[in-house]
Amino acid sequence: MEVPDVDTLLDKVVAIRPGASHRTVVEGVTPAVDGGTVPARRVAGDTVLVEAVVFAEGMEEVGAELAVRQEGHQEVVRSPMVSLGNDRFRGSFDVPETGLYRFTVRGWVDPLASWRARAMKWATAGALSAADLAEGAELLDQESRRQRGAGGKARYEASQELVRLSATPEAATEFALDVTRSWLFRTRPGRGTSVTTFRPDLAVAVDPPSARSSAWYELFPRSASVVKGRSGNFRDLDPWVERIADLGFDVLYLPPIHPIGHTHRKGRNNATEAGPDDPGSPWAIGSELGGHTAIDPGLGTFEEFRALVARARERGVDIALDLAFQCSPDHPWVREHPEWFHHRPDGTIRTAENPPKQYEDLYPLDFHCREWRSLWLELYGVVEFWITQGVRRFRVDNPHTKPFPFWEWLLKKVRKNHPEVTFLAEAFTRPPQMYQLAKIGFTHSYTYFAWRSGREELISYFGELGGTELREYFRPHLWPNTPDILTEELQTGGLPTFATRFVLASTLSSNYGIYGPLFEEGEFAAIAPGKEEYRDSEKYQLRHWELRPRPLDDLIRCVNAARRESPALTALNEVVFHPVDNPHLIAYSRSLPDGSNPILVVVNLDPHHVQSGWTDLRLDHLGLGGDESYDVHDLLTERTWRWHGNRNFVELRPQGFPAHVLRVERIGIATGVGPKSD
Amino acid sequence: MEVPDVDTLLDKVVAIRPGASHRTVVEGVTPAVDGGTVPARRVAGDTVLVEAVVFAEGMEEVGAELAVRQEGHQEVVRSPMVSLGNDRFRGSFDVPETGLYRFTVRGWVDPLASWRARAMKWATAGALSAADLAEGAELLDQESRRQRGAGGKARYEASQELVRLSATPEAATEFALDVTRSWLFRTRPGRGTSVTTFRPDLAVAVDPPSARSSAWYELFPRSASVVKGRSGNFRDLDPWVERIADLGFDVLYLPPIHPIGHTHRKGRNNATEAGPDDPGSPWAIGSELGGHTAIDPGLGTFEEFRALVARARERGVDIALDLAFQCSPDHPWVREHPEWFHHRPDGTIRTAENPPKQYEDLYPLDFHCREWRSLWLELYGVVEFWITQGVRRFRVDNPHTKPFPFWEWLLKKVRKNHPEVTFLAEAFTRPPQMYQLAKIGFTHSYTYFAWRSGREELISYFGELGGTELREYFRPHLWPNTPDILTEELQTGGLPTFATRFVLASTLSSNYGIYGPLFEEGEFAAIAPGKEEYRDSEKYQLRHWELRPRPLDDLIRCVNAARRESPALTALNEVVFHPVDNPHLIAYSRSLPDGSNPILVVVNLDPHHVQSGWTDLRLDHLGLGGDESYDVHDLLTERTWRWHGNRNFVELRPQGFPAHVLRVERIGIATGVGPKSD
């Protein structure tokens, strides 16, 4: 008997609401962000795990499959999902390329599987009847006509065999329930099957592999001169690239490299008046020498810039530029495009502000002006321009003060031609704004990490960042310091605090950065008590950083090396915290999605004293059984300890390496002969 | 300057994805179930609280409003939402009638409010400039032209006044920032404003007031005879209605009242063979005397049934009937509509089953048969038929074994003409199926409550039922026993356990029921060890229940009286658990959404011993300050104690009333002179 397509017919016969229930229910499909209106984010090369709840009425067995379509392609790729029990199904698909993949889950009632599940129960009860067996044969026969080729043929033959064996029910039962034949008892959905497709379609946005992990180093090129007193230039950066690569960083981020305005130029320590030799803030972009597509002549030429980009890349270091979409009053756009700025009734342009702070050296752009289209296109052109110069990583200054649709449009437009380009959002703002920028396409985001100190604060904050939906699209980029942020903790804790904050930043997230060389030097002088700005900040004056080893170099080199050899530390994965009985010690672990490469980090948060304590490890998160010995190998010191169970002793000094970065190794796993506990 | 509608223009100029970001973001709108695809459920007379996160870029101020449309009406009712800070907004709308209400949230950038917020900051810093004030005047002037009537006029005048005062900035500032004028600095969205409307629309399904709370009493009418040995009938139920009303119940639920089949009729204690006088299970519906629209002649006539319904209603008791959509082999449909049943290849009809159990006295209906339309319409007709007889509450037997679209269609169709009718789903099945029935329209649902014993199990289960999304649509109906469920706990705990389970059922949820009079008698004899069926169950044989007081009557009467006088116990609200230092004691409280009428329940879960302990009350959930004395008045015993703070002593015996149902009363609140702590 043919099964009518109840859903389709029903929609015609009776008026029920759009999205009314189907015989088969498909719900709870993950990953989904904001009810599926926002794509989850992954990296090219990832495998996306999809889960769903699929069921129908009563004891009906259901089948489920994933349907995936890459944007720009016609083909829909379908793959079966497997049952996890409790109505849950799991499937997966690979995302080898950047771009958007749309997916959904389809579910249907499977009469053959339902028959077999029922037959198994009756057979177990010793009461599978001839009528039941005949029904199985008929269902097989029906399915054989719906499937072409080998599948159809095998089902037809099985159906005939069942009929043949019907005289000997025991033999027929054995034949039908033989586990090697279970694949025959699966119905492919087709015509006459009521299939439920989950709506709306969900999506995964796939970023380039460079989005997965990065260690950034921020450096003012003008401070990199080999000669004290003159501005450093691109050629002076060569030895710095060597140093940065040697320390294990893979991105060198330069603050804006454009000509700096004269009008209301800021002086040393953010003074309202600049002295005659003060260079001004690099973020006050634009002068008579040009704007966002010009280079400050003191730094060098385009040719020298391109050479720097090329040489750095040879050493494995990407040059990242700053996108600060604002203008000094001397920027060419102010003269050429007054319509892009907000004029007050008295004809003046309002300067940038954050009351009571006034930035007299900066005009904001008016993204909502009447001529917004030409402005937006010009800004898009700026990004294209620098990509042509070889740049493929951008740090975006205060993106949250510009409209969200602008960024969504720009990022999409850039990626269409340059999928390898990534954007880091510097949005120290309210959480909804910060997260919205990630939703509309920023690759990475600065976070509140700099201000989260103490064990409870860290656990709570990384609990939030690891929340079910947030971790699907928001990639935290951790910075212990920036030119604007020298936290009170760093001002007061001395070198051990710098070391601790470095280990936290570089192991709590796959993406992090430091503003150097002040950081690895342990520079802690603020402009004033209670302020977070650096004293004598190079934002406003020329500084001179000598090329020499610095106190934290060893630690940085070792941690970056540990990151490179530990896929778990550079994957976008969950951070699991483990109890320690001393509140000055924090312990956490990360592993690959399949549980492999477990890395356990223990950090001493006290900059003044040796701290020791006993762990209470969550062994299941380390791939360990409850009563098992295992080795922990410190990737920083190359020392190994044999541990047992969840309680183990740790002791860390604040000086030197105030942390363990431990690779957890089950004993004998390499040879396959070790104990395996459950 | 006019603000262009950026979103609209942008959609035309550049190709961005559907649902692309808008300047104003509206997200996290609640209540929403399954991303808005399933309506939240409320009761007529409720006020629906709506919250949303609304923001734009930078420091822009936004406005938000609720837009609500009742299904079947054209008018969209808009109401402003108020800011709660942190980008959160709240609004509300009333749902006075049953049916569907659709709602959404609209958000927009408010230039006037943004100007004023900025001006406040500059004024505080003593630096609000004349240019700023002129800008405010201009924005007011613009808005005055967009608003008709008084609002426009007032803004125009304020604009003129600001211009007049511009020579004296101090006076102008005072004028603009005067708190009594803040309403002027609100922009109504209109033409030229980019407004973001949250999509998809969300919905609230509104049930009749009778859905809010109910206390059910299940009784087999055939056991209610005044003469032992003959079947009870509808007239015999009169004194039982008196009793039930006196105990405080408001629903009398009768198992199926239809003619019972003969073929494979079950005998005493579910024997395969029935004796000549065995009446059979009322769920084996249908004989030569009729089917689902007939009455078993032993019970009485339609006239007598209608009289029972009317008399019960006079006493405040609704008669609820059972919808068991299945047939005995003797049901007229088997003969008249063989196409509604599933025939196996050998021509036989498969009986109902749950391997290894076989229900030979029952044929399931085939809801997916070729003639499903006529079947579904016939079943709909059954419901309409009994509504015509005065029934307005139905208990639905095993709805999860019938297709979900069937129920969605039927419930919607019934409600269209009879919005007052409610449906209780008896679906002891996997959670997704149980919850799906609530999503598609069942008013109430049986739960796993009967099997949740012990404090941790109860707290965990009611935590799940109170989960953010679930509590928006799923109304638990708690039954400590049913004709099929005599739990091991009840079999072994004696009367104190019956008392405890009664208090839990009747105070943990606004809807509950008992299967009596076995329950209030404390009947604990099961058919066999390890089984949950009653011995000599009246499902299969005639029993005779005398009309007389029973051991739990007092407790039941007192608790139902406490429910009637305590709106918090009959509202669909959260259950908050409070720590007690003795694991045998469980404490929980419920209050109205505005925090009023806090009721604290403490129950002794130990049926054998007196238990005492100290509470650690979560005072904020009881509307109390940290260091406050207050009275707790036991609604069961009318005793009052004066308590202080969170730690208070409780002691409960298992006998008699093993629980306190305490109304928490702040001292002096009635006269308004008492202490008020924060």
Image (cartoon, coloured by chain):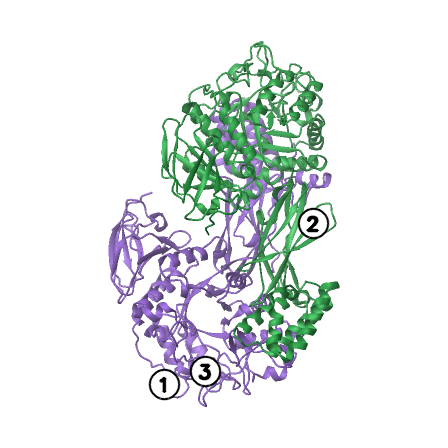
Chain colours: A green, B purple
Kindly identify which chain the residue marked by label 3 belongs to. Answer: B
Kindly identify which chain the residue marked by label 2 belongs to. Answer: A
Q: Is residue A194 left or right of residue A645?
A: right
Under mark 3, the amino acid is Ala
Q: Which residue is mark 3?
A: B271
Q: Which residue is mark 1?
A: B226
In the picture, the disc for residue A69 is: 2
The residue lying toward the viewer, choosing from B349 and A188, is A188
Under mark 2, the amino acid is Arg
Element on which disc 1 rests: loop
Please report whichever mark, 3 or 1, sits nearer to the chain's N-terminal start: 1
Q: Quadrant of residue A646?
A: top left
The local crowd at label 1, few if under 14, some if 14 to 19, many if 20 or more residues have their Cα within 10 Å, is some
Q: Are marks 2 and 1 in contact (CB under 8 Å)?
A: no
Q: Nearer the viewer, mark 3 or mark 1?
A: 3
Q: Nearer the viewer, mark 2 or mark 1?
A: 2
Q: Position of residue A468 (x, y in %)?
A: 52, 46
Q: Is residue B365 left or right of residue A486?
A: right
The residue lying toward the viewer, choosing from A606 and B475, is A606
Q: Position of residue B376 (x, y in %)?
A: 61, 73
The CA span between labels 3 and 1 is 27 Å
Q: Is residue B370 left or right of residue B119?
A: right
Element on which disc 3 rests: loop
Kindly identify which chain the residue marked by label 1 belongs to. Answer: B
Q: Position of residue A641 (x, y in %)?
A: 43, 37
